[in-house]
Amino acid sequence: MKLHRELGCGFKEKVYQDAFEVLLNECQVPYSREQHIGLTYHGVLLQHDFFYDFLCFEKIGIEIKALESLDGISESQLINYLHVSNHQLGLLLNFGTTSLEYKWIPNQWHHRSSSSIG
């Protein structure tokens, strides 16, 4: 919320990602940026993989958007990332509106034994 109050809306996603990283560092939150998520299908690691914008505390996947409003596509993206990665929780943040939009998404598949499908 602090980030949205200070920058407002109208910037590209990368600007919000860069500023979000500054806040994570200031608050000493452990994170990795553009955290890789690989997907294995029928024993084959797929060529095209996925990336969270941030992975915090090694269990919370964060996706940052700058859209006119949150949509089902953005939510589905994060749900799929959680499914494949087996992380516990996702946070979808949208800085593209006059008020910050956010949605917490629990991973309903958490505790699966592997990140492979099929």
Image (cartoon, rainbow, N blue to C red):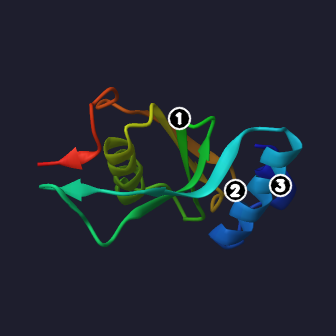
Residue at screen point 23% across, 47% down? 116
Q: Describe the element under mark 1 as helix, strand or loop.
A: loop
State the CA–CA distance, disc 1 to disc 3: 20 Å
Q: Nearer the viewer, residue 93 or 83?
A: 83
Q: Quadrant of residue 42?
A: bottom left
Q: Quadrant of residue 43?
A: bottom left
Q: Which mark is residue 59?
A: 1
Residue 19 in the image: x percent, y percent?
A: 79, 59
Q: Nearer the viewer, residue 108 or 32?
A: 32
Q: Nearer the viewer, residue 10 or 52?
A: 52
Residue 14 in the image: x percent, y percent?
A: 67, 70
Q: Quadrant of residue 83?
A: top left
Specify few, some or many for label 2: CA neighbours under 10 Å numbering under 14, 14-19, or 20 or more.
few
First in sequence, mark 1 or 2: give its number. Answer: 1
User: Quick check: marks 3 and 2 in contact, CB under 8 Å?
Assistant: no
User: Quick check: marks 1 and 3 in contact, CB under 8 Å?
Assistant: no
Q: Describe the element under mark 2 as helix, strand or loop.
A: loop
Q: Which mark is residue 98?
A: 2
Residue located beneath label 3 in the image: 22
First in sequence, mark 3 or 2: give its number. Answer: 3
Residue at screen point 37% across, 33% down? 107
Tell whether 12 sits left or right of 29.
Answer: left
Q: Describe the element under mark 3 as helix, strand or loop.
A: helix
Instruction: From the image, state whether disc 1 or disc 2 is nearer to you.
Output: 1
Residue 15 in the image: x percent, y percent?
A: 73, 69
- Residue 82, compared with residue 112, is above or below; it is below
Quadrant of image for the N terminus: top right
